[in-house]
Image (tube, coloured by chain):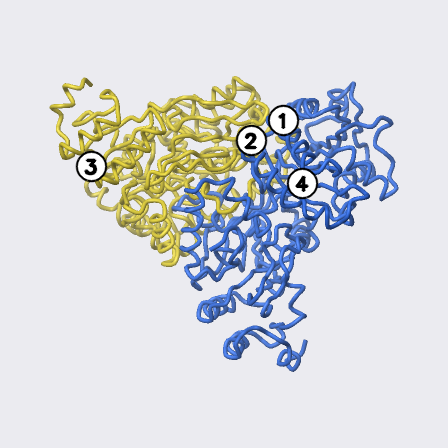
Chain colours: A yellow, B blue
Amino acid sequence: MSAINKQVATSSLADQSLASLMAIFDSRDVVLGDDALPYAVDESRALTPQPSAVVFPRTHEQVVDLMHWARSNKVPLVPSGGRTGLSGGACAGANEVVVSMEKMNRILDFDPISGLVRVEAGVVLETLQEYCTERGWYYPVDYASKGSAQMGGAVATNAGGIRVLKFGMTRDWVAGIKAVDGTGETLDIDRCLVKDNSGYSVKDLLVGSEGTLAIVTEITFRLTRPLEHQHTLLVGIHDLDHMVDVFGKARNLAQMNAAEFFSESAVRVVTELHGLKSPFHEHYPFYLLLEYDEAGLDIDTLAEVFDGLDVIVSRNEKQKEYIWSLREWISSSINAQKPYKNDVACRISHIKEWLHDLESGLNAVNPAVNFIWFGHLGDGNVHINVLPSPDMARVAFDVLHERFDQVISEIASQYHATISAEHGVGVLKKDMLPGMLSDAEMTIYRKIKRVFDPDGILNPGKLFDG
Amino acid sequence: MSAINKQVATSSLADQSLASLMAIFDSRDVVLGDDALPYAVDESRALTPQPSAVVFPRTHEQVVDLMHWARSNKVPLVPSGGRTGLSGGACAGANEVVVSMEKMNRILDFDPISGLVRVEAGVVLETLQEYCTERGWYYPVDYASKGSAQMGGAVATNAGGIRVLKFGMTRDWVAGIKAVDGTGETLDIDRCLVKDNSGYSVKDLLVGSEGTLAIVTEITFRLTRPLEHQHTLLVGIHDLDHMVDVFGKARNLAQMNAAEFFSESAVRVVTELHGLKSPFHEHYPFYLLLEYDEAGLDIDTLAEVFDGLDVIVSRNEKQKEYIWSLREWISSSINAQKPYKNDVACRISHIKEWLHDLESGLNAVNPAVNFIWFGHLGDGNVHINVLPSPDMARVAFDVLHERFDQVISEIASQYHATISAEHGVGVLKKDMLPGMLSDAEMTIYRKIKRVFDPDGILNPGKLFDG
């Protein structure tokens, strides 16, 4: 967009504010009007986007200047990465300025001896993964949106995904962060060390803070050795007791990388849409996908341990792909039906009763809805997807969402479960948060927010209100 | 100690304060006078202990009451666990009341399906390890003081140890914390879940906060599968370049559990004191100990990869013990000489230049001192031990300590290293902290402290002053 266009594009910023904003950035790095809209939404489409502008910093120093500008002009900033979030954390409402990190997308430093890589916040996950793999290292946090999710967003949301069971969350791989807090101070924290007990872990406070405490400009990630070749298994599961039992048996064999489950309804939608065959002659209420390193675990031992069950042990890449596609294509296969989605977790030992109560509770809201269950059993993490029955009007279904939230919230509190396992709180779940946390915790959250952002200019209205 | 003794024991507490303190606890759970002194020091003996009292809570509620008492009476509290710390974090000075957690030592809950164990803060590490091992699970954070170190202290100091390379620090195993903050509020945080992205990680803020933000009363730890049988290797190392090179080669083979190094001077002191043989006919400036899971790594492959080097690959338990004793007995073998100790870490890629500069810098303070080098190469973590030459007067050596601190601090800042890898800051390193952190970070530390402890009653003077 040219500078001339920008002059005529509408913005709710006062002329003087706009002029001082334009002084920080090259003209091609500020976008106003309708062209700004796509940068003000995420996958959730939780808010009607009404940004005053989107800016594209290219340096850390520009972010510092921007923060001082925002404080002086009392304009809220909304950090924005790949906008693959599902909770509205990167949505920008009226009069907010979006800070897109996509032009800070350089890989700055690679240290093969220490196993560290330093990147700007706008580097895309897949780019990082490929860069490391080419150099004999591995960045192990992996999830479906890797083609567009950016590392700043991964840090802000503490992204999880499919190999958390073995490798943990993004938090576990952050060795250092450079960020600008809400006062414009640069925080260049941690020495990129595994061991650094030098006081409060401000780094861990920034990870998962959803852009409400600071804007992250650079991250150093720890890396690990390349992923071994994998055995992948799919097991037909009779009921939830059986699932927990098989999981326990599997865990005794060796360290698993992944333990994913999904319901028959999920398999049906994927196989029908993609023309795939059903995994077994018999249909099961649930399926469990298990993944192990090949090294140290013989394929025949694997097959033997699950003898008597309906099980596919992958013998080649094609079989692995088939098994994983049953799991990975669920979300995209149902998106057209605009399901009600939620992302929750509880202890594995409670999962049977908890899922039962969730299904009954949601069914009590409306008996005509359908469920697609899937998630990361190894982490106790379930992605709830509720679909309208075919003859239900869209609007009749959409009005149920608030009630679904309430049911999930109430049941979460009975099970000491979380209402946000890996998708974050954003705007969509902020009303559920006080039901989960104590007043003392909410008070601490608000005070921590004021430590980093006394004027409340960083992503206001996300996580909690003012 | 009887109630009568307590009446006559001296205490700097005002009569009224003492009376209200005694109202919270059973009389056998309050100790005054000289009997309190052992509870007011740690291994560092950093402060002259002068506690007003030591109290032994048996319940979370007593800790809540105690906190309210401390606020009303303006008496600082010093949390105390196994007192195995090396930085003075658990030392109590004049007019402070020590809160010993040793009577809160129950294992409260064990969840074998989810792999979780909930304990009171006073449970000893070795007790926890044995409890889990007997039940087919493993708590993997392991260090020399496990026979007396308590889990509350492990959390407060984010304890590390010998298997951090594979398993990480205590932080990585904390699933939930129950604590009392400096306002007397109970924080029952986290749902014991691997995945819980519900806002700021207050849990991670408490881990490593050295008792300055809250008193931890209960912790839920995640567990992992039992440790596999181990291959243990010892390699003779020609110089620091060679050490980093061999480490890189070792890392390519398989995931290591441990990569520990020590200098010839360390081997000499251990073998002489314990009557052990030297590992090799030839003497090397350094030795590298490597540990792998047996599963997935053939012993002959191991031996082959290190062919051409002087290497012992353990073929039985006795050999493993011998190799580990060379590493584990270093500290106890030199303690009688009261070495100057420090605990630092930097990137592995900088370790050669950094150790070289450390040795030159410390030698420049006094050329007659001797060095024992050892540490966790895989974590870039070095335990510096400086010994006086045999003819040096104790007092002449002790006056050098402050200068040693300065040298280490200066060099740390050149290398972006940490002055506290795993031992914490306590009182011994608080003067070094501002040299390592920015003013912005120190400001944030102070503000965070005030969020949790507005009256400054929790372990004041630790980490930083007021």
Image quarter hosting the N terminus of chain A: top left
Q: CA distance from mark 1 to mark 4?
A: 24 Å
Q: CA distance from mark 3 to mark 4?
A: 52 Å
On screen, residue A274 above or below B359: above
Mark 1, residue position:
B353
User: The residue marked by circle 3 belongs to what chain?
Assistant: A
Q: Residue at x 57, y 59 (%)?
A: B120
Q: CA distance from mark 1 to mark 2?
A: 9 Å
Q: Secondary structure at mark 4?
A: loop
Label at residue A48: 3
Closer to us: B442 or B169: B442
Label at residue B415: 2
Label at residue B162: 4
Picture mark count: 4
Closer to us: A69 or A360: A69
The disc labelled 1 sits on which kind of residue?
Glu
On the same chain, marks 1 and 3? The answer is: no
Name the side, left or right, on which A460 lies relative to B317. left
The disc labelled 3 sits on which kind of residue?
Thr
Counting from the top left corner in percent of width and height, residue B7 is at 62, 81
Query: Which of the two discs, 3 and 2, sits closer to the camera?
Result: 2
Dot 2 alpha-carbon crowd within 10 angstroms: few under 14, some 14 to 19, many 20 or more: some
On screen, residue B466 above or below A255: below
